[in-house]
Amino acid sequence: PLKPNQVGQVILYGVPIVSLVIDNNERLCLAQISNTLLKNYSYNEIHNRRVALGITCVQCTPVQLEILRRAGAMPISSRRCGMITKREAERLCKSFLGENMPPKLPDNFAFDVTHECAWGCRGNFIPARYNSSRAKCIKCSFCNMYFSPNKFIFHSHRTPDAKYTQPDAANFNSWRRHLKLSDKHPADELVYAWEDVKAMFNGGSRKRALPSA
């Protein structure tokens, strides 16, 4: 039988999350999930998704909060903490992460990317900097300035061999169509990682495109 305020640990998507028994239910600390598994998403995104999924947060008592702090689930400064069931935590994470986690890439990894809008451009897409849809995560290879993906496809340099292509200005999220890996024959792992990164902050479900043969 579960003892009230019993501390445990649940592995969610490979990450250990502290659990606490509240009203005969094992509940997980939403803040800890937000700071680990969902750290690429804003507080508002997580809150809105939780509400949309009909997940209710149970607030901790001061005693429970202290237990969670000691267990390392919460920073000492936290004044409150919402708890959700394991099933709810799985649903919430799955709605953001899909069946698979964001790609595990080396810390300093960057995709070498190219677009052909207007005069075209080439840059380094740095996944570690891509923490919101408007994050300036692409460093232009010509001028070393940083751009968000949406802005980068409207940024170009006229190189001697560049040809002009009319930009597709109508489609706000069209960067996913226009931004390509510079390597014409990338390894499958690279293609998968790129598809996964493009699926982030895309609102819809992630569709993993198979590399065209």
Image (cartoon, rainbow, N blue to C red):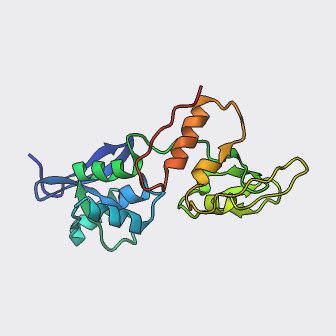
Pinpoint residue 95: horizontal percent, then vertical percent.
Answer: 35, 51
Q: Nearer the viewer, residue 111 or 16?
A: 111
Farthest top residue in view: 213
x then y, percent, for residue 211: 56, 31
The quadrant of the rendering that contains the N terminus is top left
Left or right: 208 as drawn, with respect to 124: left
Residue drawn at x 73%, y 50% is: 116
Q: Is residue 200 left or right of residue 158?
A: left
Compare residues 68 and 178 and report the one nearer the observer: 178
Residue 1, visible in the rendered structure: yes
Q: Residue sitting at 84 percent across and 49 percent down?
A: 162
Is 125 left or right of 140, judged from the image as shown? left
Q: Is residue 140 left or right of residue 173?
A: right
View extreme (left): residue: 1
Residue at the extreme bottom: 79
Residue at point 82%, 60% (across, down) = 143
Of residues 185 and 118, the one nearer the viewer is 118
| Count of marks placed on residues | 0
Residue 76 coordinates in the image, percent (x, y)? 39, 68
Q: Residue at x 52, y 42 (%)?
A: 103
Coordinates of residue 181 in the picture (x, y in percent): 67, 41
Q: Is residue 29 above or below residue 209?
A: below
Which of the 4 quarters of the picture holds residue 42? Answer: bottom left
Asked whether residue 109 appears in the rendered view, the answer is: no
Q: Is residue 134 above or below residue 122?
A: below
Q: Nearer the viewer, residue 202 or 139?
A: 202
Residue furthest to the front: 166
The quadrant the C terminus occupies is: top right
